Image (cartoon, helix red, strand yellow):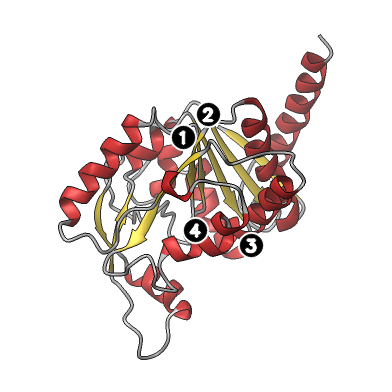
Amino acid sequence: MQVVILENPDAVAEYGSQIFINRLKSSPKSVLGLATGSTPVALYKKLIEACEAKEISFSDVTTFNLDEYLGLSGEHPQSYRYFMNEQLFNHVDVNTANTYVPPGSAENPVVACKEYEDLIKQNGGIDIQLLGIGRNGHIGFNEPSSGLMSRTRVKTLTKETIEDNARFFGPDEFQPHLSITMGIGTILDSRKVVLLATGENKADAVRDAIEGPLAASCPASALQLHQNAVFVVDEAAASKLSQCDFYKHIEQENQKLIQQLATL
């Protein structure tokens, strides 16, 4: 597990975006796993800027989103399909037919989950999966108690997550309590995972995910099992880690090695 601690949220977005930019430069037909929420927005802005500058292209890219509210159509302003269109897809040269979000309005959600898993496999699996992390350690909508090898499925949201997301819904507006989410096992199948976290309110979850035991009580701790997982966090989100100086030292040495290899 690689832990990158940076000064502020903008530095986190810049570091994370460069991982995706470098991937698209070397592999234009990449399969990307994407996430919603406030944290990835700054990263998406940087990807849009890179696309507008012709530095990268999304024309041959396929994307799979982590999750979607069950009961919302893709046209609903609070759906994650709508979010992705507004925050990324409408601003880059992606073929929207190759952008997949779990179908929140599926007539048979159980069948839709199996079909989503199959679709990921048919496309060769996910090359890079972007993640945020909830205050309770959830990734996607895999709430505490989720099986560490779970697959795409219908999931009940915790009261904490519902309360965190209530600000996006009007007082009289329907707010779903169910979702379709990639499972933790599905996420672990990705070839690389990039988790972004900013702010002091994420510090407990970041600590438990990186330094705590592998446990269903913190779903993100499952990333300890991944061979190529990168946590990119700001100083505030890293404030409760016990080994901050060590992680910073490792990253400095990694950057030196990368520079040395680039000269060979």
Amino acid on which disc 4 is placed: Thr
Q: Residues within 10 Å of mark 2 (few under 14, many from 20)?
A: some
The answer to which image quadrant residue 88 occupies is bottom right
Observer-side mark, 2 or 4, equals 4
CA–CA distance in space, label 2 to label 1? 9 Å
SS of the residue under disc 2: loop
CA–CA distance in space, label 3 to label 2? 24 Å
Q: Residue at x 70, y 51 (%)?
A: 46
SS of the residue under disc 1: helix
In this figure, which residue is indicated by the disc labeled 2?
228
Which is nearer the N-term, disc 2 or disc 4?
Answer: 4
On residue 224, the disc is 1
In this figure, which residue is indicated by the disc labeled 4?
36
Which is nearer the N-term, disc 3 or disc 2?
Answer: 3
Q: Left or right: where does residue 88 sit relative to residue 161?
A: right
**Is residue 66 or residue 248 the one in the foreground?**
66
Q: Position of residue 157 (x, y in %)?
A: 31, 65
